[in-house]
Amino acid sequence: MNKPTFIQLREQYHFDAPSLADWADVDSKTIYNMLMRNPVHRFQAEKVLKTLSEVTGNDYTLDTVDVVLKD
C-alpha cells in the first residue's frame, strides 16, 4: 500500500493550511513545504501530523504519510 502524500490528505480533508499551522504551533511555511513536497524537519512534520490526527480522528504519522524530511 502506498502512503498518501500530505497534499492528498489536504484534498481529502480540505483543511485550511494557516489554521493547521496555528493549531500545530508551526510556521505556515512548514505546511506549504509539506504540501509542495519540500523537505521539513522531522519534529515539525510530527507536530503537524499529530494535530491533523487530532482534527480528523485518524492516526497520521511519518510511518503512514509520505513526507520529505531534511537530513
Image (cartoon, helix red, strand yellow):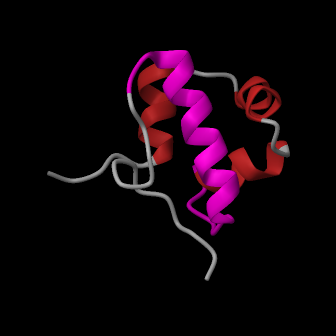
Give the answer, above or below, for where 62 lies relative to 10: below
Segment tinted magenta in the rendering: 35-58
Residue at (47%, 17%) from the top-left corner?
Answer: 56
Q: Quadrant of residue 36?
A: bottom right
Magenta span includes 47: yes
Provide residue 71's location: percent of width, then percent of height: 61, 83
Provide residue 20's location: percent of width, then percent of height: 71, 28
Residue at (65%, 43%) from the top-left corner?
Answer: 47
Residue at (62%, 52%) from the top-left corner?
Answer: 45
Residue at (21%, 53%) from the top-left corner?
Answer: 2
Is 43 positioned to the left or the right of 23 in the image? left
Give the answer, above or below, for where 56 lies relative to 28: above
The answer to which of 67 and 46 lies nearer the viewer is 46
Give the answer, above or below, for where 45 lies relative to 19: below
Provide residue 18's location: percent of width, then percent of height: 79, 30
Magenta span includes 11: no
Going by the picture, which residue comes out furthest to the bottom? 71
What secondary structure is the stretch in magenta mostly built from?
Answer: helix
Give the answer, above or below, for where 2 lies relative to 70: above
**Count of all numbered marks drawn on residues in the image:** 0
The answer to which of 28 and 54 lies nearer the viewer is 54
